[in-house]
Amino acid sequence: MSRTKLYLFTADFPFGTGETFLETEIIYLANGFDEVKIISQNTTSNQCRSIPEKCTVERIDLLVSRFDKMKSLLGIFNPLFWQERKIIKTVYGKKLTKGIVSTMLISLYRAIKLKARVELLKKENQQGVKQFFYSYWCDDVALGLAMAQKEKSTIFCLSRMHGWDVYFEASRVNYLPFRHFISDHLKVIFAISQKGIDYGLNVWKVKNKSALRLARLGVKAQNICEINENQFLLVSCSNVIPLKRVELIVRALSEMNDFQIHWVHFGDGLLLEDSIDLAGNMLPSNITYDFKGRVSNQQVLEWYAMNNPSAFINVSTTEGVPVSIMEAMSFGIPVIATNVGGTAEIVNNGNGYILKANLTPKKLAETIKSFHRLTPTQKELKQKACFETWKKHYNASDNFSQFVNTIHDL
């Protein structure tokens, strides 16, 4: 039986603080392959997360300088550029804007650079070792792997797709490059939500429908939190950036003055100081709050276990399927969330509340009040429904073990 080696391409992991969800998946990947090499695009941060002994790490620089942007103009001589141009106009029905052209050229430039690295890894391979190349995001790396896969039938290239790498609307130019080429040439693209697959079929309009498969993420098992009737503890966990709309939570809480609430937010970002200032100016005396900033994923989970939150809240404008919601549900914490991306696949009105994406602060406040008014028995039912949702669909042991087996069967 041949040995197996997996090359995992990440944006940051295990450097920096991004891609916390890989901290669990990497354990199963390491157990499922003889060797794992993590190739990270983070070239500056220190390694701050532990990885299994079987894993090795290297960095790849895919940053694009001003000179690189000039060189990327040569992409107009690449047949793939003209194929994509035709797809944009005839399949997507979009005008070819300056932003779209720039996105195409830079994507192509980065992908060719990545493909060159794959070619070297292929040449360095030992005889009898089966190579798998896995891009954690369906981005320029996935495009580079698709190029390599087209030329090298002896390697196995695949990708995941989550949220921002699925939905055109999440892009500044309302477009994501080379979706048809990627889906035509990768062995498989694993979507973390059914919504992502549906979007690929209906909006990307990919021809190779069998390339899109469902492979949900997952989190570890936890104990169900106790219902705390002495304190209403609301928790949120996200980057503090525009699409996460943390200020919407502040504005909703500012309209509530009929019972005590303590709100805790985990995460930092561009709008952290603005959100803290807004909370200080707007929140009434019955609302206390604590912005914890960025802490480790393990610290967040330990805090849930010790403090028994009443409810978890997420009001993003776009998502894949939030791992933060999976983690809350593994504790049986009911979730209030907006119906964006694949969120409705995990949150419903049985295990929490699913709200329209364009909700107002008043509507969010009313929902929080509705949950607070539930009897202990009603709250317990939502808790159990949360835990069952996690157990059935987002159990890390089940999902990642199956994912590894599926890769081996390619």
Image (spheres, rainbow, N blue to C red):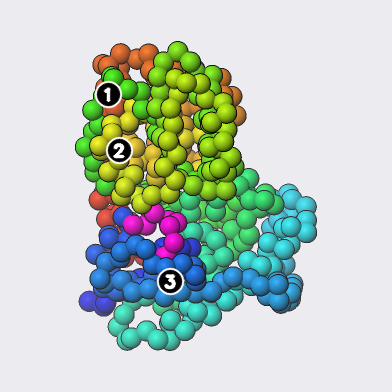
- Report x, y in % for residue 42: 49, 67
Neighbourhood count class around disc 3 (C-alpha, 10 Å): few under 14, some 14–19, many 20 upward = many
Task: Determine the CA span between mark 2 and mark 1.
Answer: 12 Å
Say the numbered circle drawn on residue 39: 3
Task: Specify the amino acid type for callout 1.
Answer: Asn
Q: Is residue 36 left or right of residue 205?
A: left
Q: Quadrant of residue 309?
A: top left
Mark 3 and mark 2 lie on one chain; the one further toward the N terminus is 3
Neighbourhood count class around disc 2 (C-alpha, 10 Å): few under 14, some 14–19, many 20 upward = many
Query: Which element carries disc 1, helix, strand or loop?
Result: loop
- Report x, y in % for residue 386: 31, 31
- In depth, the one of 112 and 202 nearer the eye is 112
Q: Nearer the viewer, mark 1 or mark 3?
A: 1
Task: Specify the amino acid type for callout 3.
Answer: Ile
Residue under pointer 1:
228
Residue under pointer 2:
304
The C terminus lies in quadrant: bottom left
Residue 161 lies within the magenta run: no
